[in-house]
Image (cartoon, rainbow, N blue to C red):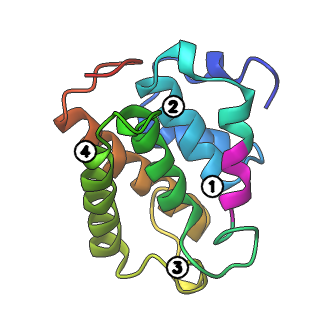
């Protein structure tokens, strides 16, 4: 995607936005962080560093195809960006609670959160690949969770 990747997402539903980013060559974790970050995280909190750190979670952490799915881990990063703490004086319990809820939703939807197992499943109607399908459904699940928390577009709720 070119430098104006955000412009391409205008008016597109969150799952479709994540898929569009993924199909342009970004990793699953990057697609989730970019599509949901733009929608929920204040613009002032988004920067190259936020986007760069999400790439390593692709392919089950560091491309190993093991461990947790990059869609899940990047989704938790978005939750942490919204509800996590930046000092010891802040309460991070909401970030932990919502991350656990997202993880439970993810495992209920896909029966596992392990990248190796997930990649073996069939593609769904949302995308041509299994990972694309997980990107779409994972993005939609997280968007539903954040919307239920009262998060408006591009800002904390």
Residue at disc 2, secondary structure: helix
Q: Is residue 60 rendered magenta in the image? A: no
Q: CA distance from mark 2 to mark 3?
A: 24 Å
Residue at disc 4, secondary structure: helix
Quadrant placement of the C terminus = top left
Quadrant placement of the N terminus = top right
Mark closer to the chain start, 1 or 4: 1
Mark closer to the chain start, 2 or 1: 1
Q: Which mark is residue 28?
A: 1
The nearer-to-camera label among 4 and 3 is 4
Residue at disc 3, secondary structure: helix
Q: Which mark is residue 94?
A: 4
Q: Is residue 152 left or right of residue 148?
A: right
The nearer-to-camera label among 2 and 3 is 2
Q: Which segment is the magenta one?
A: 53-58
**Residue 44, image quadrant:** top right
Residue denoted by label 3: 118
Q: Residues within 10 Å of mark 1 (few under 14, many from 20)?
A: many
Contact (CB < 8 A) between labels 4 and 3? no
Mark closer to the chain start, 1 or 3: 1
The nearer-to-camera label among 2 and 1 is 2
Q: Residues within 10 Å of mark 3 (few under 14, many from 20)?
A: many
Residue denoted by label 2: 37
Q: Give coordinates of residue 35: x percent, y percent.
A: 53, 34
Q: Give coordinates of residue 143: x percent, y percent.
A: 33, 40
Q: Is residue 153 left or right of residue 22?
A: left
Q: Is residue 127 left or right of residue 152?
A: right
Q: CA distance from mark 1 to mark 4?
A: 25 Å
């Amino acid at each position: 995607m070119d430098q104006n990747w955000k412009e391409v997402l205008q008016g597109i539903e969150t799952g479709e936005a994540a898929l569009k980013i993924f199909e342009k060559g970004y990793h699953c974790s990057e697609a989730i962080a970019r599509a949901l970050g733009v929608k929920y995280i204040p613009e002032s909190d988004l920067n190259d560093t936020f986007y760069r750190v999400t790439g390593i979670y692709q392919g089950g952490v560091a491309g190993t195809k093991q461990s947790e799915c990059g869609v899940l881990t990047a989704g938790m990063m978005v939750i942490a960006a919204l509800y996590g703490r930046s000092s010891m004086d802040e309460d991070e319990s909401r970030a932990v609670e919502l991350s656990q809820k997202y993880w439970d939703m993810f495992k209920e939807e896909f029966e596992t959160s392990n990248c190796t197992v997930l990649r073996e499943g069939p593609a769904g109607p949302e995308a041509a690949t299994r990972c694309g399908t997980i990107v779409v459904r994972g993005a939609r699940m997280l968007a539903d969770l954040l919307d239920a928390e009262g998060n408006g577009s591009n800002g904390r709720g």
